[in-house]
Amino acid sequence: MPRGQKSKLRAREKRRQARTETQGLEVAKATGAAAAGKPHSPVFGDRPENLPAAGTPSTPEAREGATGATAASSGTNSAENINSPKAESASFPRGAESSLSEILNKKVVLLVQFLLQKYQKREPIKKADMLKFVIKQYKNHFNEILKRASDHMELAFGVDLKEVDPTRHCYTLVNKLDLSYDSALNEYEHMPKTGILMIVLGVIFMRGNCAPEEAIWEVLNMMGVYAERKHFIYGDPKKVLTEDLVQLKYLEYRQVANSEPPRYEFLWGPRAHAETSKMKVLEFLAKVHDTIPTAFPSWYQEALRDEEERARARAAARARTAALASARSRARASTSSQAK
């Protein structure tokens, strides 16, 4: 390979690496805001009494954004050295100020960064590696750190951490959308958009399957996402919603009929209908608010009806396929019999 091309490839890899590390360090801030939410928000307008009203972020998880920026040194080249001795000493100062909760918070941020890097490189995620390179002497807190990091990955990026080999304790990150719908989709490049997409799909669902644009931004503003400001995870949020996700057919963005001045609204696009469901979106939003889908009876019932309709559609499709196969088989048998 020519030297110039190698240099370009190395530069591109460094840019991707820097982007991944920035996301890993900042993701806790975004998910803390999302988890904190606000009571009587436009998403959950009829918040049931048993839904915890989220106020000022006071939990360690919500405060991670404030401490996460110093949790790891920038410019690391691999997942293995995010906890290098130099980074470790800088991230975890000695003395009484470094309480256990602060250390665990920083471990969560480092583990998110580790998971993002593994996802980017398509490398297996092993418990042994997490213990060796991230958790280290805090092995007794592994389950807690892993759970919180997994929650951050889900809320910020819309991906689930799944254990695929219980014997060897190997994990993988699975996008909440069924990306088999389009195998050409670059999963890593679009991963950061999945989290914001799930939120928007939820607002649309809870607004009667069609949400005015101002309602979408009212919810996103509560998460620190603004149309006129560049976001460290989502980039240009306005472009993501009104162009990128529309072009990918996850969202429909149209002018409200007879509106003057023009107003716009969002609907689910065909790919959203194909790759997720109302139940999955409701489960995602319920988790954001630390509750369960049944806490929202009317939306839960609608999601159940949607699941039943989808099941009937799948059964009908299978029946049509079976009938077609049977007809072809009879036609071949008839042709073979006539030939004899």
Image (cartoon, grey):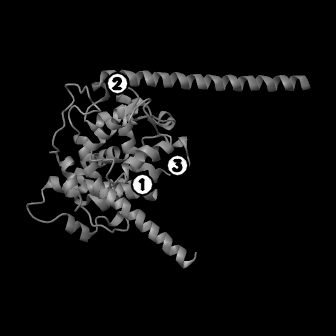
Residue designated by label 1: 119
Q: Residue furthest left?
A: 96
Distance in Å between CA atoms under marks 2 and 1: 33 Å
Instruction: Evaluate whether residue 90 shows in this view.
Output: yes
Relative to 35, is 216 on the left or the right? right
Query: In percent of the image, x 65 and y 26: which residue is there?
Result: 321
Residue 96 locus on image (x, y percent)? 8, 61
Of the numbered discs 3 and 2, the one sitting upstream in the chain is: 3
Q: Check disc 2 and report its element: helix, strand or loop.
A: helix
Residue wearing tag 2:
299
Q: Quadrant of the N terminus?
A: bottom right
In percent of the image, x 49 and y 22: which residue is there? 309
Up/down of 128 relative to 43, above or below:
below
Question: Would you call the spot at circle 3 few (<14 residues within 10 Å), some (14-19), or many (20 or more)?
Answer: few
Disc 3 residue type (three-letter):
Leu
The answer to whether the residue labelled 3 contacts the one labelled 1, judged by CB atoms less than 8 Å apart, is no
Residue that numbered label 3 is attached to: 185
Which one is nearer the viewer's eye here, 212 or 117?
A: 212
Q: In x, y percent, where is residue 166?
A: 39, 45
Horizontal and vertical percent for residue 180?
Answer: 53, 42
Q: Residue at x 45, y 59 (%)?
A: 121
In this rendered view, identify the residue nearer to me: 71 or 253: 253
Q: Amino acid at mark 2?
A: Trp
Camera-side residue: 122 or 6? 6
Residue drawn at 56 percent across, 49 percent down: 184
Mark 3: secondary structure: loop
Q: How many marks?
A: 3
Lower position in the chain sequence, tag 3 or tag 1: 1
Q: CA distance from mark 3 to mark 2?
A: 30 Å
Residue 185: x and y, percent? 52, 49
Separation (CA) of disc 3 from disc 1: 15 Å
Q: Above or below — where is 282 with respect to 95?
A: above
